[in-house]
């Protein structure tokens, strides 16, 4: 089962991170959390682990309107929020991979029609954000 929406962009890592932030904002998402995996691995596991993973950030994106609708439908959906968006350096310095959790994964865990509607809306918005980053 594919569980991410993915695009590869011809942008250096730092530019891709900023482009993703902007595209998410344009789709009504804010970034609630940010985990810099490289820095975390360096601090907790040492420099070799940081080098092995490369540039890698997890952005915890949230659209408050969608989150509110999902939680009203099923409070347990909070365990799946926020929507994680990963930006990681690709095989060469000018290619960056951007991945977002596919909200349809929520649908597979719930039989609620309201959750399906939220997942459809979130998926449309995340696809648009990824497409916008890829268009830059």
Image: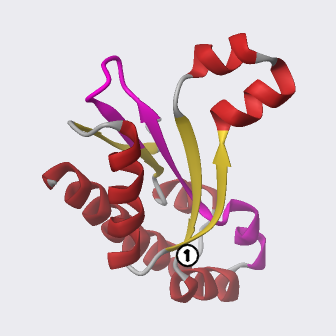
Q: Which residue is under mark 1?
A: 115
- The extreme right residue here reads 44
Tell me if residue 21 comes above or below residue 99 in the rendering: below
Between 30 and 55, the one lying in front of the other is 55
Left of 84 or right of it: where is 24? left
Tell me if residue 84 is in the magenta stretch: yes
Residue 52 location (% of width, % of height): 60, 13
Between 89 and 121, the one lying in front of the other is 89
Q: Which residues are magenta?
A: 75-98
Between 130 and 70, the one lying in front of the other is 130
Tell me if residue 87 comes above or below residue 103 in the rendering: above
- The residue positioned 54% from the left and 35% from the top of the image is 56
Q: Quadrant of residue 42?
A: top right
Tell me if residue 10 comes above or below residue 53 in the rendering: below
Q: Quadrant of the C terminus?
A: bottom left
Residue 84 location (% of width, % of height): 57, 54
Dot 1 falls on a residue whose secondary structure is helix
- The residue positioned 37% from the left and 63% from the top of the image is 126
Tell me if residue 102 is in the magenta stretch: no
Residue 133 location (% of width, % of height): 25, 55
- The residue positioned 42% from the left and 44% from the top of the image is 99
Left of 16 or right of it: where is 132? left
Between 94 and 2, the one lying in front of the other is 94
């Amino acid at each position: 089962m594919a569980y991410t929406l993915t695009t590869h962009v011809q942008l250096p890592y730092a530019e891709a991170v900023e482009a993703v932030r902007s595209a998410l904002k344009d789709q009504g998402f804010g970034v609630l959390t940010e985990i810099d995996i490289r820095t975390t691995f360096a601090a907790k596991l040492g420099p070799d682990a940081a080098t092995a993973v490369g540039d890698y950030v997890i952005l915890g994106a949230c659209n408050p309107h969608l989150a509110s609708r999902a939680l009203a439908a099923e409070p347990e959906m909070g365990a799946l929020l926020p929507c994680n968006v990963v930006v990681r350096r690709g095989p060469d310095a000018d290619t960056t991979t951007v991945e977002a959790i596919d909200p349809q994964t929520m649908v597979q865990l719930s039989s609620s029609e309201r959750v399906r509607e939220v997942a459809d809306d979130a998926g449309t918005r995340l696809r648009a954000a990824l497409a916008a980053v890829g268009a830059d």
